[in-house]
Image: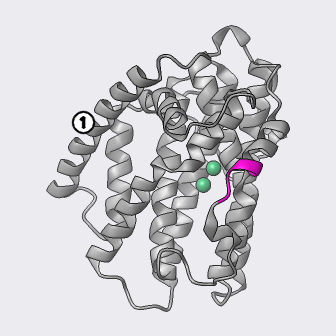
Amino acid sequence: MAEGTVFAAGWTLDDVQWSKFDASKVDPGLLQAVKAASLVEFNAPDYVIYLKRVFKDSGAETLANIEQWGVEETQHGLALGHWCELADPTFDFKASFARFREGYKAAHFFSDDATSVRGSRRGEMVARCVVECGTSSFYSAIREAADEPVLKEVAGRIAADEFRHYKLFFGMLHKQDEPELPFWRKLVVALTRVNESDDDELAYAFYAANIPPSEPYKREEYARAYYAQSLTLYRRHHVRKLVQMIAKTIGADPNGRLTQAAGAVAWRALRVKAGLNTRAAAHIAA
Ligand SMILES: [Fe+2]
Ligand SMILES: [Fe+2]
């Protein structure tokens, strides 16, 4: 499969060339991050229920798109989980996922409130766009960093889906029959969502996927461990594109000077954070 292949939508697990798996090319640190990501992706049905509640009056097409989005995210979890089981035969994807479900519960998934936690449907779409910006750059970075050919392929397929999800939610953002949000409000939602990447979800996924249940959960420690394995994957062009996509979401010029400056600051911040977390997490044994 050529390095720059752009994978089409609608792929299935049977399309992946699993027979090309090469155990000698698995990076143990990257494997830890991919295990955690597989659990978060497979948890998509909760987001589908939540989004269908928030968008219940937005028409049949929107609800069908949310449903299809959830099917694709769940498949991302299955594909990554299967790769992790090939890379580490002691890893049990379904058992790890059960542990994750047991220990991680986001409050807004369990309420009946049809209002988005972001205050409006447009706010919800800004937050969803930011998440898809993050996942598209994350899997693009994995695709480039991985030596193992099947992980390269799976990450390429997922990254292409995540870019399409961004486009889907960007379109939904502008279709809502709500007043346009002021720029500052979109900026606050976007920055809040970027900041929430430090939340419990990734730390708990890292714990459930990589640490024996006999060890107690330590949120900060496992968040650091996750970031130590994931932030080091990014290259400058991934961060530049990520910031440009977020800028477009909030209505700023993706190629303007402010966006370029924000991209440079984000790149430096990421390098600092990656360094700090790598040192802090060095004592966590694989
Ligand atoms: Fe995904
Ligand atoms: Fe996605």
Which residue in the protein does label 1 denote? 268
Q: Nearer the viewer, residue 142 or 108?
A: 108
Q: Magenta region's main secondary structure? A: helix
Question: Can you give x and y, in whole percent of width and height, for residue 30 in the image?
Answer: 58, 24
Residue drawn at x 34%, y 25% as measured from the top left: 275
Percent across and percent down for residue 123 are: 45, 76
Establish if 158 lies above or below 176.
Answer: above
Q: Position of residue 13 (x, y in %)?
A: 81, 40
Quarter occupied by the N terminus? top right
Q: Is residue 285 above or below residue 82?
A: above
Furthest toward the left, the residue is: 257
| Residue in the image at 72% along x and 12% along y | 23
The secondary structure type at the circle numbered 1 is: helix
- Residue occupying image coordinates x 57% and y 83%: 115
Q: Residues within 10 Å of mark 1 (few under 14, many from 20)?
A: some
Instruction: Answer above or below: position of 233 versus 199.
Output: above
Q: Is residue 177 visible?
A: yes
What residue do we see at 17% from left, 57% from top?
258
Magenta stretch in the rendered image: 101-105
What amino acid type is highlighted by mark number 1? Answer: Arg
